[in-house]
């Protein structure tokens, strides 16, 4: 491998190390209680290398935020491309959120719980970010296909995914009685019953038949 390639690899590795260190400190101490020197010391890199790659703490936080949202969006995009009907997509999105919260709790804590606009004032609210727009897209397509009732998009999206996100918060706070994934199937079923049309909701059909 050439010297240039080695330098590039070291540079990318260093950048990722700083981002992972910042994620750990921001998610435990908070943005305002973490300094560039804390990150430098924890990552065991020079202060100059941090400023070279990021410029300042705010730019570092933005790079981390963008990177995590991109990773989250990539997972949701994969669900949307893999599944064809709205129910399967909704189930897949909830499964992705639960899996991410279980395997990468620091990432989910930073994305969902950090008050980003306090230190990134030019960023839109997280609910307007691409991953959340993809959830909205799932619901819009479900309404267009007749699988989801024609109700207001914000209401439908909240009904479909708001409960799952709340369970993720409870998991991150450590107050759930069972592991988060134990609630997956019941959360998927409950979320779908909240938005599905009668024709795409087997439970509703069963109730109607029983009443008749």
Image: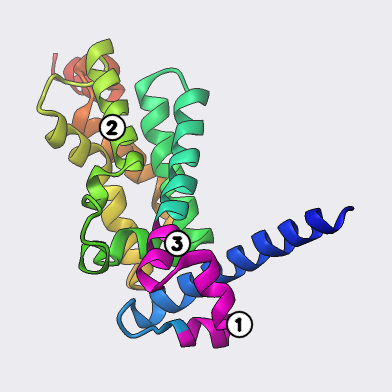
29 above or below 200? below
Give coordinates of residue 174: x percent, y percent: 37, 73
Return the residue at label 1.
Answer: 46
Is residue 41 inside the magenta stretch?
Answer: yes
Residue at 40% across, 35% down: 91
Alpha-carbon neighbours of circle 3 within 10 Å: few (<14), some, or many (≥20)? many
CA distance for labels 3 and 1: 25 Å
Secondary element at tag 2: helix
Residue at 27% across, 17% down: 147
Q: Which residues lie in the magenta part? A: 37-65
Nearer the observer, 53 or 174:
53
Judged left or right of residue 163, residue 24 is right
Q: Residue furthest right?
A: 1
Return the residue at label 3.
Answer: 107
> Is the Cβ of the residue at disc 1 closer than 8 Å to that at disc 2?
no
Q: Nearer the viewer, mark 1 or mark 2?
A: 1
66 above or below 116? above
Residue at 50% across, 73% down: 51
Return the residue at label 2.
Answer: 192
Residue at 50% across, 81% down: 39
CA distance for labels 1 and 2: 50 Å
């Amino acid at each position: 491998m050439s010297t240039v390639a080695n330098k590039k690899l070291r540079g990318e590795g260093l950048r990722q190390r700083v981002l992972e260190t910042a994620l750990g400190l921001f998610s435990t101490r908070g943005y305002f209680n973490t300094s560039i020197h804390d990150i430098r010391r924890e990552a065991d890199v020079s202060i100059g290398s941090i400023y070279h790659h990021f410029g300042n703490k705010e730019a570092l936080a933005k790079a981390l935020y963008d990177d995590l949202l991109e990773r989250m969006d990539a997972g949701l995009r994969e669900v949307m491309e893999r599944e064809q009907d709205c129910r399967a997509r909704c189930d897949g999105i909830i499964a992705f959120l639960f899996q991410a919260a279980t395997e990468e709790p620091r990432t989910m804590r930073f994305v969902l719980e950090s008050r980003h606009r306090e230190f990134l004032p030019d960023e839109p609210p997280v609910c307007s970010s691409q991953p959340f727009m993809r959830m909205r897209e799932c619901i819009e397509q479900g309404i267009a296909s007749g699988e989801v009732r024609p109700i207001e998009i914000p209401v439908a999206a909240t009904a479909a995914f708001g409960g799952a996100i709340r369970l993720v918060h409870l998991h991150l706070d450590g107050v759930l009685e069972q592991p988060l994934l134990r609630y997956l199937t019941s959360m998927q079923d409950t979320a779908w019953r909240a938005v599905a049309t009668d024709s795409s909701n087997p439970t509703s059909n069963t109730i109607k038949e029983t009443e008749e």
